[in-house]
Image: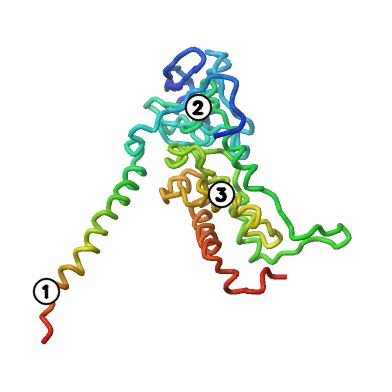
Amino acid sequence: MSRHQPALKTYVRPMRRWWMRNPHFARYMLREASAVFLAGYAVMMPARQASAAPPHN
Amino acid sequence: MCSTCDPTAAVGCPHPERDPQPRFQTYAVPFARDTSVLEGLQYIKDHIDGTLTFRWSCRMAICGSCGKMINGVPRLSCQAFLRDFYPHKVRVEPLDHFPVVRDLAVDQSGFLDQLERVRPYLVPDEERPLAAGRYRQTPAQMARYYPYSQCINCLLCYTACPQYGLDPDFTGSAALALLHRYNADSRDRGWKARREVANAEAGVWVCTLVGYCSQVCPKGLDPVHAINQNKVRSTMDYFNVLRLLMPRGKRR
């Protein structure tokens, strides 16, 4: 915040549900959410490969 | 297009001293083909409501004073034309994320503080006497920083940045783009002083690449690219890469 506080009373628009204000923000949130699926896939893939690998003699 | 059609401009008028919540006032504004939103606001001030408060100066997208939210999009009001919105209403609001002082005027002192912190001027290694002549640069050296020197401090990128809205301590895109402008300048050696700002908690790492700032910039700057380049530099600082590569210390 600024070290110069305004003498007048001010109003700041709240940030509630900001991601719904603009299609660009909605796309950004979708992009961020895709990281969850990517992380899940990254965890699942080695686990599945390990289970599918033939046993060593 | 007729010269006196009747589009209406809904102007967001938060008056924090008087009203706890913002209210919208609707005005009918005549317009011609070349009437900008700023001229519409000037018409309202001159003919309808003399108390309407807003910033403007050059009317030609140079000064960066007249930024507003126009139909929810941060734009310079001198660059937006009423004809493009007709027959719909134009909704004009003050810039998001900044404290509204009155009507469409916001308090910019938070940004000015951030700007001061990044030292937006050349910091040379040592003072050169005038007799030493001019600093000379190649076109390639100039091309590295020139695009970032076009910033007009209009604050549209701050308004477009949800991170700045969520964390007002964030240094912000324009200030960080200017920080990069001087870091990328071959005449400047100010990174030592500026890295405190770039590497700080409220520095480059707050940016999460939303990228809307680069889209709304009226001068076509790419602040996200500038911030990313400083993230690389910040990482090198963290791991002390330069010291590993040059163990004897700084370059002479």
Same chain, marks 1 and 3? no
Viewed as shown, does residue A49 lie left or right of B168?
left
Vertical relation: B251 (above or below) B47: below
Horizontal arrangement in the rendering, residue B235 relative to residue B249 (left or right): left
Q: Identify the residue shown where x is 44% and y is 16%.
A: B20
Pointer 3 and pointer 2 on the same chain: yes
- Where disc 1 sits, the SS reads helix
Residue beneath disc 2 = B32
Q: Nearer the viewer, mark 1 or mark 3?
A: 1
Chain ID at mark 2: B
CA distance separating discs 1 and 3? 50 Å
Disc 2 secondary structure class: loop
Quadrant including the N terminus of chain B: top left
The foreground one among B247 and B184 is: B247
Q: Horizontal and vertical percent for residue A27?
A: 32, 47
**From the viewer's perspective, is the residue at label 3 or at label 2 nearer?**
3
Residue A20 in sight: yes
Q: Which residue is mark 1?
A: A52
Identify the residue at image location x=55%, y=45%.
Answer: B174
Q: Chain of mark 1?
A: A
Q: Which mark is residue B176?
A: 3
- Kindly identify the amino acid type of the residue bearing the numbered disc 1: Ala
Mark 2 or 1: the one toward you: 1
